[in-house]
Image (cartoon, rainbow, N blue to C red):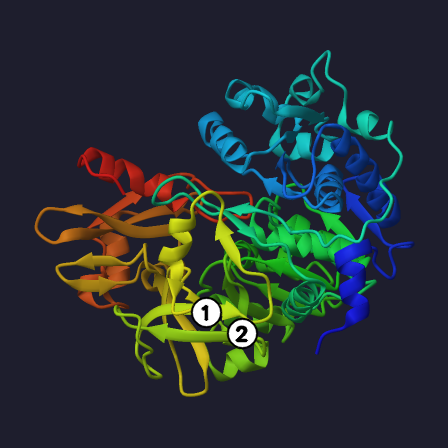
Amino acid sequence: MQNPARSERYAFSMRGEHSDVAEVIAGNRRVPVEQLIERGERAASGLAELGVGHRDAVALMLRNDFAFFEASIAAGRLGAYPVPVNWHNTGDEAGYVIANSGAKVLVIHADLLAPIAGEIPEGVQVRVVETPEEIRAAYGLAPERCQVPSGMEPWGRWLEQFEPLPPRELVPPGTMIYTSGTTGRPKGVRRSAPSAEQAAATLETLLMVFGLEPGCTTVITGPMYHSAPNAYGLTSVNLGCNTILEARFDPEELLALIEQHRVTHMHMVPTMFVRLLKLPEEIRNRYDLSSLKFVVHAAAPCPPDVKQRMIEWWGPVIHEYYGSTETGAVVFCTSQEWLAHPGTVGRALPNAEVRILDDHGRPLPAGETGEVAARLLHTADFTYHDDDAKRVEADRAGLVAPGDIGHLDEDGFLYISDRKKDMVISGGVNIYPAEIEAVLIDMPGVHDCAVFGIPNEEFGEALCAVVEPEADASLDASAVRAYLRERVAGYKVPKVVDFQSALPREDSGKIFKRKLREPYWAEAGRAI
């Protein structure tokens, strides 16, 4: 049931009920939420002077910092789209997103400016944020890299020149997130301007899956250029939650933050669970985690054994949802539901429709595997910015196919096998790498792993596993294959096993699988 009061606050004023006492915390810095929002309103006046208006875009190349919230709030106040830019991107990749989005302004941390300066499109106005101390320390950045260049006015000093923008009867259009470019250039997912009723429906869904409530305390563990941490972080601040920004995910630091701040709510990804469980038992038992009430995870398949162990450790406070940037969250499950249906990612939310389709777009019955298609009812539709054809391709009889393979059981619970684009077809057999990764991650001596398809003349594709060993572990390819051969079918054992001391990964811990896969295909003279 929709709550009009919540909708009005979220869509128009965006001020949380407890925002007068709640704080956003980053390292040793603290700012009241009310002050953060006011700074966002000042920045809105400044952006308006720079020519930003309704349906325009403001690019944010920022790590998790106060300025991320300020710039996002500012864009929303003007009816413009905040466009987070993945700061791992190369100059060419970042320049493409900034140009493609049509951003009029780029707000960027000082240390990120030099590597992309030559790729910033002509005419884009730049506002630079000094890189704060806790981020400098987390990434080992030299102090001189983190200062605003001479002749450029720092973000904080710039926005203080302006009066807060007066309230407007305007529903923010939301953040435009660029999806991953595994099969080409990334695509900007842009929603149409929502009505007040659609904004209310969106908020109700977010509150259902995030579990957030005014006055709770949370930690933002993942980079906010991703859609889920972005929505979670902005919702927590808008509701008036105490919001702690972890500069860079570290498993023991997270446990210390939970104990120190009596954290109640969190959003996580399965890789974080894996890294937490890799901590020695004496470290895991050192911290008081009894304050936790609602921990939700998504974004990637969670190995059942990992989730089971997390529930045993943290208790039945762990929830899960499934969705995509295009669909939003469409299914959800509690710990109790998961334990009754091990391996599920949840059952359709009350305002969602989920189907499994065959190759011709026809619905499949329970138990049969096919393409997952879903949509949220009563929410604003989306398009791909400047690419309506891609939007048409994603449509499945009024539903959206985010590219996953799975099935529904008789009770309506959804199970994801793998990403459709990650599925390997070897000798005509469909193989789902996520299944193999879930087994391999439990092998003693394995810190992390990635399994994917590589070119093979005989079978079309063959399986490759790249393993990151634990420190001082002694592993070889034959040992990895022997371990897997005892636990999965023979055709699922990778033909190639390589090792890397550090897999390429994002701050959330999620592996950049594309970077691992590309060299094998490039060597064969084939694009992926």
Specify the label residue 374 is tagged with: 1
Q: Is residue 388 above or below residue 521?
A: below
Q: Position of residue 169 (x, y in %)?
A: 80, 53
Do we see residue 325 in this rendering? no
Furthest toward the left, the residue is: 458
Quarter of the picture containing the N terminus is bottom right
Residue placed most toward the observer, 460 or 284: 460
Q: Is label 1 in contact with label 2 (beta carbons under 8 Å)?
A: yes
Which residue does the numbered mark 2 point to in the structure image? 352
Count of numbered labels shown in the rendering: 2
The image shows residue 399 at horizontal and vertical percentages of: 43, 68
- Location of residue 144 in the rendering, given as x and y in whole percent from the top left corner: 68, 17
Where the C terminus falls, by quadrant? Answer: top left
Q: Position of residue 286 (x, y in %)?
A: 69, 58
Indicate left or right for 82 with 156 as reference. left
- Residue located 79% across and 35% down the image: 43
